[in-house]
Amino acid sequence: MTKPQNIAQFFKQFPDDETCLNHLFETRFGQGYECPSCERASNWYRIKAERAYSCQWCGHHLHPTVGTPFEKSRTSLQLWFYAIYMFTTTRNGVAAKELQRQLGVTYKTAWRMAGLIREHMADVDGDGSLGGAWEAVEIDETYVGGIRKGGKRGRGADGKTVILGMMDADEVVTKVVANVRRDTLLPHINATVAKGSLVNTDELKSYNSLPDHGYRHITVNHGAGQYVGKFGATVNGMEGFWSQLKRSINGTHIHVSGKHLWKYAKEAEYRFNRRHRPETMFSELVSTFQPSSPK
Ligand SMILES: [Zn+2]
């Protein structure tokens, strides 16, 4: 496994804002990119007055930050890249307070940046499909939040947010859901898990109809103290993922509201899905963006 980039390498690769902007231009467009306005292959010239490049033929502008998390931000690109670098060199995530301290921005800015970086991780990770004929897929649900740090309950058990998790040998997919009822969970399972998969769950009744939907289904009875059930049924992989997610939320963040919880789940998901190649995370996150709508 290659080592993740260290801090000296980071500053060597991105010594200033200009280098960051050029990196975005090169990865999203590049010289010779066909102008969306005059439709000719163009050399693109940097417009110094704004974060833009101009077509050699018609003067049309390309803005490499449009459609990225940096689009509407006045924070420098280098600080953004550094914040992303921080997210890729930690196991438990980065608290807004820590971003504030290291970047020298306000807490509000740091908090907003962290949220946008998590959303970006979610976009880049996407939602793959899991399983396949006889492939084991673990499905489990967990409750997060509802208790404020200091032990006082926020809104009691009702304040908790439910997350559904699905995991095959390679990958995990999470969904924040309204409740654990069958009609709530099944559409997500149908959309994510391939038919014929060997689905492992606990004994929550909502999963009972899985065989009616083309799945093979085995269960582990946690109520009876089991970790491994009949035919080797287990959701230990998902349990491990939940512990990591909760460690990250409880250890790094003071309180996460239900509204934002999906981003923390996606951040953990992004990291988990690259656990065998963490050194690729930084490069991927500064080079992968939604298809740009050229302006
Ligand atoms: Zn043009």
Image: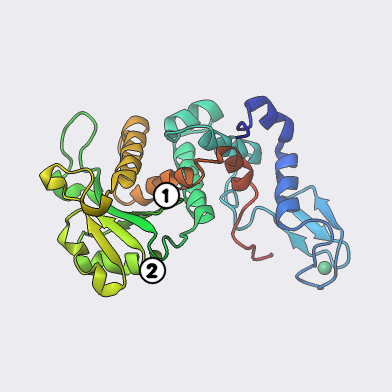
Would you say residue 163 is visible in this rendering? no
Inter-mark Cα distance, 2 to 1: 17 Å
Residue 48 in view: yes
Seen in the picture, residue 160 relative to 254 is either above or below; the reply is below
Residue under pointer 2: 191
Q: Nearer the viewer, residue 245 or 199?
A: 199
Q: Which residue is pictured at 45% across the width and 63% down the height?
A: 129
Ligand 1's image quarter is bottom right
Q: Is mark 2 within 8 Å of ligand 1?
A: no
Instruction: Judge by depth and name the residue closer to the eye, 130 or 266.
Output: 130
Number of other residues with Cα within 10 Å of mark 2, as a class: few under 14, some 14 to 19, many 20 or more? few
- Residue 134 placement (x, y as % from top left): 37, 62
Which quadrant of the view contains residue 187?
bottom left
How far across and how far down the image is residue 3, in percent? 61, 31
Q: Which mark is residue 266?
A: 1
Name the residue type under label 2.
Answer: Ala
Disc on the earlier residue, 2 or 1: 2
Query: Is 95 situated left or right of 291 in this image?
Result: left
Q: Residue at x 45, y 44 (%)?
A: 272
Left-right relation of 249 to 155: right
- The image shows residue 257 at horizontal and vertical percentages of 30, 45
Q: x and y percent of residue 128 in the render? A: 47, 60
Eyeballing the image, is 114 above or below 262? above
Q: Residue at x 64, y 62 (%)?
A: 292
Kindly state the secondary structure of the residue where label 2 is placed: helix
Which marked residue is nearer to the observer: mark 2 or mark 1?
A: 2
**Could you tell whether 31 is left or right of 79 in the image?**
right
